[in-house]
Amino acid sequence: MLAPKNRRFRLGRVLWKYRYLYLLLLPGFIWYLVYRYLPMYGLIIAFKDFNFMKGIWGSAWVGWKHFEFLFSYPDFYRIVRNTLLLNIYELLFAFPMPLILALLLNELRNMLFKRTIQTVVYFPHFLSWVVFGGIIIQLLSPNDGLVNQIRELFGLTPIHFMAESSYFRTIVITSHILKETGWGAIIYLAALTSIDPEQYEAATIDGASRWQKLFHITLPGIRNTIILLFILKIGTMLDYGFEQIYILYNPTVYDVGDVLSTYIYRIGLQGAQFSLTTAIGFFQSFIGLVLIYTANRIARRFSDVSIW
Amino acid sequence: MTKRFNLGSLSIGTVLTVFAILTFVPFYYVIMVSVSDPKMVQEGKLILWPRGFSLYTYELIISNAQFITAFTNTILRTTLGVLINLALQLTFAYAISKQYLPGRRFFIVYIIITMLFNGGIIPTYLIVRETGLIDTIWALVIPTAISTWNVILLRSFFENVPASLEESAKIDGANDLIIFLRIYLPLSLASVATIGLFIAVMHWNTYMDAIIYINRQELQVLQTFLRDMVVQMEMAATLGDMSAVQETSSLSVRTAAIFLSVLPIVIVYPFLQKYFVKGVTLGAVKG
């Protein structure tokens, strides 16, 4: 039951007592405000007709106009479908790879061999998508690419892989697997070290086979890590890496290659459709939030894993 | 029993070796092409090892003014980026690592929210524009100055430093600023170096911000320079007009440019590898 004046006095005293810590917080606090929270405020232009002269606040309100347009617009369904499909394929084919790699590495007893493999497979993660994607494009080039040169040795005609829509998704997922599987395995390897070796010894004495140990000790032991990574993946189902797509795609494969982020960049920034593409971005962020919230709820219900 | 066991180990070894070769082949191929005789490459000879060793392409790319500008800009953005990122992340992480700080929970929620929801490309672009960063080197440094993930990582590191150190320093009359600079920073040098290295790699490799925020030619970075080379090649291949390709973006020169741009990463890779397992583990346990 403090009087308002008293309370203000106390707040001032707290601020003064911890002044240096708050001083350390201040630059980061302002940064988050300007570069993370102001853009959220900027989302209101999805409900306006933005123009540069009037600015974010001054532009005229138009209500749900842009959203109504979007939902009747074939392009929108195409890019949502492309983004979703790539993510679904990634979930099916790329997501299990790091787990498999970690389980295989975990079976190795020869440490030198294990470390050599790790050194090699972690490396591509540290290459940029321009470099890695550029190399992939080169390998698949119709004129002097390695893959087509090998095809020609077998008397096959060269294929222009990068210009064929039917190959695009396979190329995206495969290049993702090659680049990121090694890196992704690290987190599983870390989780694997927390399993008590005595469990394996006891199982061996009981005559358990390699597969039995895998299903009864190893997988239950890293179950939480798998669930956690799965939730995080679900949260990004409407988000596909801009840098990867932007280097790999070209106008001939826009029909399957265009995802939300590349479309927003091309139509929004280059084509100056700020409000319309902000509406798309808003939709994307909102669905992402719903997805991660739902996945987390489900995970909490069936296990003790939660990301918050 | 023993025989089956060996068969299992053998197949595991084989699968892993094949996968390792597949991930390494692309990079190996680039190196081989870059040191081969450009004529052999142009004739479309299959290159699995250097054919007619030549470093001509490296001479060509090193004397290319655009490449030099891009390289310098990338070094500049990486240096500035590491310094600013570390300064902002360390100070913020230190403050929220103090359990007794009033409002601590608020500040943690304040940053976690930004991991779950964001304004997206266009609104962020408008704010970057409003703050006057477009077409300056700062556009590549300021908008990505804090990674919430790193802040959480550093916070849990600071939390693990024994509180007794801080308490005894306070008895000696040191204030929080001095404790942070004189006690916590020296103690965390290894972690700071690791995170600094990761920030450096991120800055070296990223190009989305350069594409969005930079239009001026003299501010191009290495990754956008490489992308332009690749795209020019792609267009030529699509149109079937290889004569449109200048000598400076022929396959040989491109591979040389790629290798040079990756060289700094190759140099720091052993250090990265030494530390990253620790970093990832820390994040996984404490995150």
Image: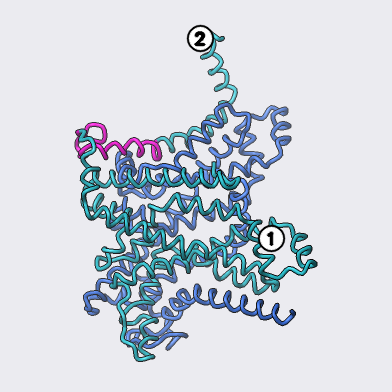
Chain colours: A cyan, B blue
Three-letter residue code for mark 2: Lys
Please identify the quarter of the rendering in which residue B171 is found.
Answer: top right
Mark 1 lies on a secondary structure that is helix
- Give the camera-side residue of B13 and A300: A300
User: Could you say where residue A46 lies in the image, as x and y percent from the top left?
Assistant: 27, 40
User: Could you say where residue A206 lies in the image, as x and y percent from the top left?
Assistant: 78, 66
Q: Is residue A231 visible?
A: yes
Q: Which residue is mark 1?
A: A217
State which tag comes first along the sequence, 2 or 1.
2
Q: Is residue B133 visible?
A: no
Residues shaded magenta = A34-60
The label shown at residue A5 is 2
At 24% across and 74% down in the image, what residue appears? Answer: B238
Residue A37 included in the magenta stretch of the image:
yes
At 40% across and 46% down in the image, what residue appears? Answer: A288
| Chain on which label 1 sits | A
Instruction: Determine the main secondary structure of the stretch shown in magenta.
Output: helix
Q: How many marks?
A: 2
- Give the camera-side residue of B204 and A118: A118
Residue A183 included in the magenta stretch of the image:
no
At 42% across and 43% down in the image, what residue appears? Answer: A289
Three-letter residue code for mark 1: Ile
